[in-house]
Amino acid sequence: MWVFYFFAALLVIQAVISLQGGVRYLSYFRHEAAKDHSDFAPYASVFAPCRGLDQGLRNNLTALFQQDYPAYEIIFVTDNADDPALKVVEDLRREFGKKESVISRVVIAGEATNCGQKVHNLRVAVKEANPQSEVFVFVDSDARPRSGWLRSLVAPLADEGMGASTGYRWFIPIKGGFASRLRAVWNASIASALGPRSDKNFCWGGSTAIRRATFERAGVIEEWRGAVSDDFAMMRALRRAQLPIQFVPNCLTATHEDCSFRELLEFTTRQLKITRVYAPHFWQVILFSNLLFVLIFFGGLALVITRAALGLSIILPLAFILVIFALGSLKALLRWRAVSLPLAQYKKELRRDAFAHLFLWPLASMLYLYNALAALFSRRIRWRGITYELKSPQETVRMKS
């Protein structure tokens, strides 16, 4: 029992520290939301890799044409001219063809051989950027940015010493369902890992901006060689160049999707396998912190049930479990309040999903443990219909279908 109480006390301390981080997170969102509008808006190239038909793809890509930005180009890139996403792209290019502030093009990159398909597509696409472009912006086809997204994402780059600026995704289930909401809760904890510490932030490939000169100076395209993860590879290049990454709360971007339980496991496990290869220290923290939580929290619940069945006192172990749960739920509430600022247009959906964020987080921790353990035994992932074996950060093997 004393072993349980010792580690339960450690978990309570960890939860208190995490809650303090939640307070800082909300404060940072409020501070950034109150900032004055930036006038820094040089010509930008927005790279939008597409493969297949994402849920809500047309609305996602429409948002790229509706940015409040003076002049920019969108370069849609895919590996195959027969990709069904191109039909949506061409329809939108015709629809917005007369809009003066934005032009668009399509690049067919061909099949990748020794790196991830998305990385290969981006390596080809950046070479097609307009010579006058000063900023490169990367966005995923499952993201639906608000109209001020591009301006907000580019603004921090007014500081030439800034390596990159980044947003992150926030899953908003369409129809809901347990698997979809659990994925949203799982993903939310990563979103709250970003914050004011520019030396600790990471890039998210679905919403990242970098000066063209910085991209070239940091050797990002060389770091992409042989890689499967565009954002982790970019982060490694910027870390090596000792350049900071700024998280922009106003660029938190909605992803409107549902998923099955199989898709939930595939998505979350893929993220942890990639993390183990590109940032093994992050993976180790995830593994051991969630192992401790699962053993103490769910082990504590089993202990309470067992002691109750034996007629023994359950007051102290139950108190520990309730305190841990309450602190975790408070952290989730602070995070939910923070993201409600940039995602105010989805107020109804956020309220609908609040219950899941407040109560499903212990299950998300159990899922993290499963993902981390799966990453311990395999480096094979499936992404957008393609299977890869991750040998190292710059060695990827594309498996034959």
Image: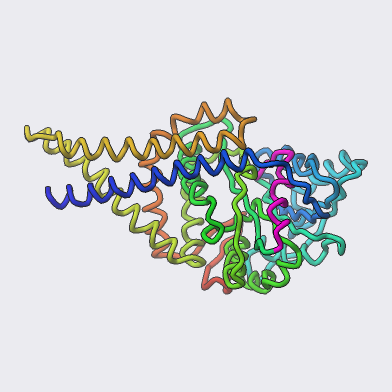
- Color style of the picture: rainbow
Magenta-colored span: 143-160
Which quadrant is the C terminus positioned in? Answer: bottom right
Residue visible at 61% across and 43% down in the picture: 32
Total number of numbered discs in the rendering: 0
Residue 377: give x, y in percent of width and height. 39, 65
**Residue 6 in the figure: left or right of residue 259:** left
Residue 401 in view in this figure: no
Residue 317 in view in this figure: yes
Residue 246: give x, y in percent of width and height. 61, 55
Q: Residue furthest left?
A: 311
The stretch drawn in magenta includes residue 147: yes
Compared to residue 79, the image places residue 296 above or below, namely above
Report the front residue among 24 and 295.
Answer: 24
**Residue 332 in the figure: left or right of residue 206:** left
Compared to residue 233, the image places residue 312 above or below, namely above
Report the front residue among 380 and 216.
Answer: 216
Residue 116: give x, y in percent of width and height. 63, 65
Residue 326: give x, y in percent of width and height. 32, 35
Residue visible at 51% across and 62% down in the picture: 274
Residue visible at 46% across and 49% down in the picture: 265
